[in-house]
């Protein structure tokens, strides 16, 4: 795999390069200290993956990604950042970020994330090749074997171990609403609006809708926390488990998952920040892509 690194911190660039090459993940074919300098190089050499810092001088990570997408760059972006601002993280996923790598850089996390993105890259290319091969065939019955959106949602919730949680149905209905609206990946409506629309299926007065929307928020929050705890337990048992590798850094802030793992190991109360917006955003993005 061919990597390009964009980061204004030279030490971070060197560390990432060493991890990539020493772990035989691929080759770093270029680097830049800001987005403005990176754009012409990336367009010229077309790397498979771009590791890009969120906050940089001249042109930040999000703006750089936008400009590269405008010029039809199809490589995969992985964001590097120590910023924990939820809105900025959500915006990054909206722009097409696949994964986050947290600063300070951790070798195990970098290897885990890059191996997972490499796996997805190869799978994506394989699927494209299969589709091209099948494009010459008439497949009239294919639609009968495809999963429904609800089945896709429930498959993911089952992977996270929360299909039996009360809030899983609320989450499913929220995603179905977004699909029904033909909602694009960004920006999503406010969560409060989504809760109220789901409430309106069963409640009819504004007072009842308001009460139910608050109840939905709490059910969804508890359900997502349960998913985080399940993944943390899974990570303790097997850090290389494919479900842990995929869901932990993509659907959640990986630092929160690691914190839960430490709490579990020390038999402490399970406490973590629950980012509902990010979870819904990423889940909808995954379902929308199917």
Image (cartoon, rainbow, N blue to C red):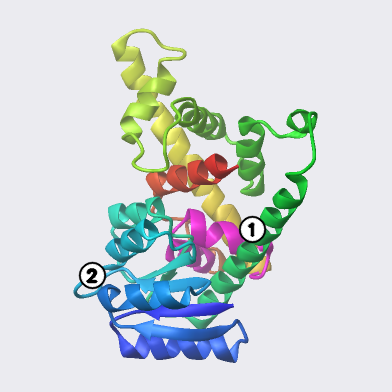
Of the 4 image quadrants, the one containing the C terminus is top right
Q: Quadrant of residue 77?
A: bottom left
Q: Residue at x 80, y 40 (%)?
A: 137
User: What is the x, y in percent for residue 19?
Assistant: 52, 87
The total of numbered circles placed on residues is 2
In 3D space, how far apart are the residues under numbered discs 1 and 2 (Cα atoms)? 30 Å
Q: Residue at x 49, y 66 (%)?
A: 75
The disc label shown at residue 289, or none = none
Q: Is residue 285 above or below residue 206?
A: below
Looking at the picture, tell me which residue is in the foreground, 165 or 14.
14
| Magenta stretch prevailing secondary structure | helix
Of the 4 image quadrants, the one containing the N terminus is bottom right
Residue at image mark 1: 124
Residue 168 placement, left or right of 222: right
User: What is the x, y in percent for residue 201?
Assistant: 46, 14
Q: Is residue 178 above or below residue 43?
A: above
Residue span colored magenta: 239-263
Looking at the picture, tell me which residue is in the foreground, 18 or 221.
18
Looking at the picture, tell me which residue is in the foreground, 118 or 250.
118
Looking at the picture, tell me which residue is in the foreground, 49 or 25.
49
Residue 38 placement, left or right of 123: left
User: What is the x, y in percent for residue 152?
Assistant: 64, 38
Q: Quadrant of residue 39?
A: bottom left
Q: Residues within 10 Å of mark 2 (few under 14, many from 20)?
A: some
Instruction: Determine if the magenta segment contains residue 240.
Output: yes
User: What is the x, y in percent for residue 216?
Assistant: 43, 29
Residue at image mark 2: 59
Q: Residue at x 29, y 73 (%)?
A: 35
Query: Is residue 182 in view?
Result: yes
């Amino acid at each position: 795999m061919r990597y390009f690194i964009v980061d204004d911190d030279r030490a971070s660039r060197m560390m990432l390069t060493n991890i990539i090459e020493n772990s035989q993940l691929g080759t770093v074919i270029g680097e830049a200290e800001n987005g403005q300098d990176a754009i012409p190089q990336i367009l010229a050499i077309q790397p498979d993956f771009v590791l890009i810092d969120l906050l940089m001088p001249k042109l930040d990570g999000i703006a750089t990604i936008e400009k590269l997408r405008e010029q039809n760059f199809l490589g995969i972006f992985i964001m590097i950042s120590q910023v924990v601002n939820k809105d900025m993280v959500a915006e990054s996923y909206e722009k097409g970020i696949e994964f986050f790598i947290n600063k300070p850089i951790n070798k195990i996390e970098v290897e885990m994330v890059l191996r997972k993105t490499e796996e997805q890259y190869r799978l994506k290319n394989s699927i494209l090749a299969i589709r091209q091969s099948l494009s010459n065939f008439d497949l009239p019955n294919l639609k009968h074997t495809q999963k429904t959106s609800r089945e896709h949602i429930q498959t993911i919730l089952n992977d996270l171990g929360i299909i039996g949680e009360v809030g899983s149905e609320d989450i499913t209905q929220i995603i179905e609403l977004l699909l029904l609206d033909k909602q694009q990946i960004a920006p999503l409506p406010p969560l409060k609006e989504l809760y109220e629309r789901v409430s309106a299926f069963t409640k009819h007065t504004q007072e009842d809708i308001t009460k139910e929307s608050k109840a939905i928020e709490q059910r969804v929050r508890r359900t997502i926390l349960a998913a985080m705890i399940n993944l943390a337990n899974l990570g303790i048992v097997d850090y290389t488990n494919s479900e842990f590798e995929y869901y932990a850094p993509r659907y959640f802030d990986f630092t929160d998952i690691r914190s839960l793992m430490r709490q579990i190991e020390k038999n402490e109360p399970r406490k973590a920040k629950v980012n509902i917006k990010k979870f819904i955003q990423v889940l909808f993005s995954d379902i929308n892509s199917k």
